[in-house]
Image (cartoon, rainbow, N blue to C red):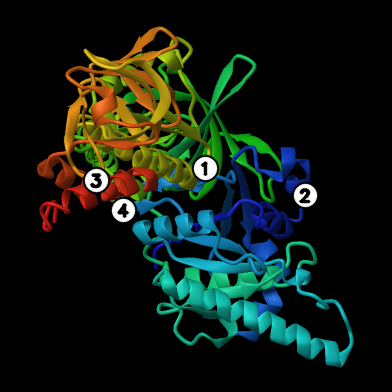
Amino acid sequence: MAKIRQPIITVCGHVDHGKTSILDKIRGSSIAEKEAGGITQKISFTSLPQEVIKTRAGEILEKFKIPLEIPGFLFIDTPGHAAFTNLRKRGGSLADIAILVIDINEGIKPQTAEVLQILKANKTPFIIALNKIDNIAGWQTNSEAQAINVQQNFDEKLYTLIGALNSHKFEAELYTKITDFTKKIAIVPCSAKTGEGIDEIIAVLCALSQKFLKNRISLGKKGKGVILEVKKEKSINFLESILYDGNLNIKNQIVIASFGEPIITRIRNIQKALPLSKGYKTTSEVKAAAGIRMQIMEKNEILPGMPFQVLENDLDEIKKEFKQELSQEIKTDSSGIIVKADSLGSLEAIMTLLKQKQIKIIRAGIGDISKKDIYVGNSLPEEDRVILGFNVKLAEDVQQEEFMGKIILNPVVYKIIEDYELWREEKLKEIEKSKLGELTKVAKIKILPFIFRNSNPAIFGVKIESGTLSTGTELINSKGEKIARVKTIQEEKSSLSEAEKGKEVAISLPGVNFERQLQEGEILYSNLSESKFRKFKENKELLSSDEKSLLQEIAEIKRKENISWGI
């Protein structure tokens, strides 16, 4: 029988639902308390060896008659945004199983929904840790009567969640009630605070790994991994990585993927993550699956999320694999927006979510927003002139003012997409509105008791009651009779090309005798052709209620003469 490695487990979910706290209980540490604001600041590995699993979950495994075959687990704690998607390898997610943490009192939040979409896209098996059960009112009571209420409260929240998961096309059930784990997602109620349900999570992960993942976790000989982060300590760069298959030796040469030629390098130093997150230990050889830190000879810039392999006289084959992998991950369109992210996995995740929403991407890359991104962005059509940046910033030589569009930065994927959709909706309205602006502007004006000249031309004061009055606008009265075209508009001795609602201005009308044709208090309207009225009607969703009301008044005047005008 082929040897099996430690399954790689990632913990994910909505911010504040208790991901790190659950991992703390599994490893018996308190990382969460040390993190700034309770948000995980760095990726950390937790190796849980077989002997620790026996101590923690032995009784439960015995109760359910589950033999312990795996050598342990490698847990990866990830930051609160969707950075768990950094964890990619060829053919899908680097994680063999995910623990999706959901707060029982909050249910599915935006980041939970985002994680569900990515788990589905990556076909990653997962279980649900239903956290914070200790927050259910009366949970700690010993009263039998109260216990019935607590059970009712719990059941109500549980089945609300099951229903919500169903709407996301996932069938889930309490782990004790499942007979076929391939058809239903296991829900394990737990409390990171009290420790309830934590050993059960470990037992369920053991059962699922051993029953369904043996092919996936069978151990090969050749060392393969993924670089998660490039960390600088003093003057030394460390590559914080996961070795997910095979062996890695200090004597090996490795090949690291990049967007140009792959980087071939020797290793200066390997450090392996110790069990239960107790730091690193320098070693000459390490076996998958393991969290490692490498120091390499090569000075070239290494990008987070890139795969690496041990070189075994197979450079051409590795190059071919890397090229195929990178082209699969970053597939762009002939039109669309620009997307930047902090790593290959993050970029692929945000692109997956954007493509699910039919949002096209013309350019995608890893790292901060560069001058080239700005240059390309400025050449895009107005509705696509946007750069989305996930967990990145503007490069030092870039000024935001150089970009003629919108830059949206956020360390949370769903917020970036939400902000983008809002921006695009407003931008499209603005573009359509400007197209409408090319049509004749319409106005309703009231004649004020200020007559400056009776005729040749008639000059008098008006108030713009509705719309916008422009020079050259032909005016009609409430009977539909043509009066004249506006020659000039003046406001306190200044000439205007147009005047908006609420303004009081003087206008001049050539060929009009005020005394004979007009009177104080009379209402005049812009004259409008039937075709232009229909154009406004076609774009009515872009019109304000004031504009709609004005157009309706003009239509009613026109229909006194022609009953079907504008219909």
Q: Is mark 1 on a helix, strand or loop?
A: loop
| Mark 1 vs 4: CB contact within 8 A | no
Q: How far apart are marks 3 and 4 (CA)?
A: 45 Å
Q: Quadrant of residue 542?
A: top left
Task: Residue 412: give its label.
Answer: 1
Left or right of 399? Residue 70 is right
- Pointer 3 or 1: first along the chain: 1
- Pointer 1 or 2: first along the chain: 2
Disc 3 designates what residue? 554
Q: Distance between the residues labelled 1 and 2?
A: 24 Å
Q: Distance between the residues labelled 1 and 4?
A: 17 Å
Q: Distance between the residues labelled 2 and 4?
A: 38 Å
Residue type marked 1: Val
Q: Nearer the viewer, mark 2 or mark 3?
A: 3
Disc 4 designates what residue? 356
Q: What element carries label 2?
A: loop
Q: How many labels does the image show?
A: 4
The x, y position of residue 47, in whole percent, is 62, 52
| Mark 2 vs 4: CB contact within 8 A | no
Q: Which of marks 3 and 1 is in front?
A: 3
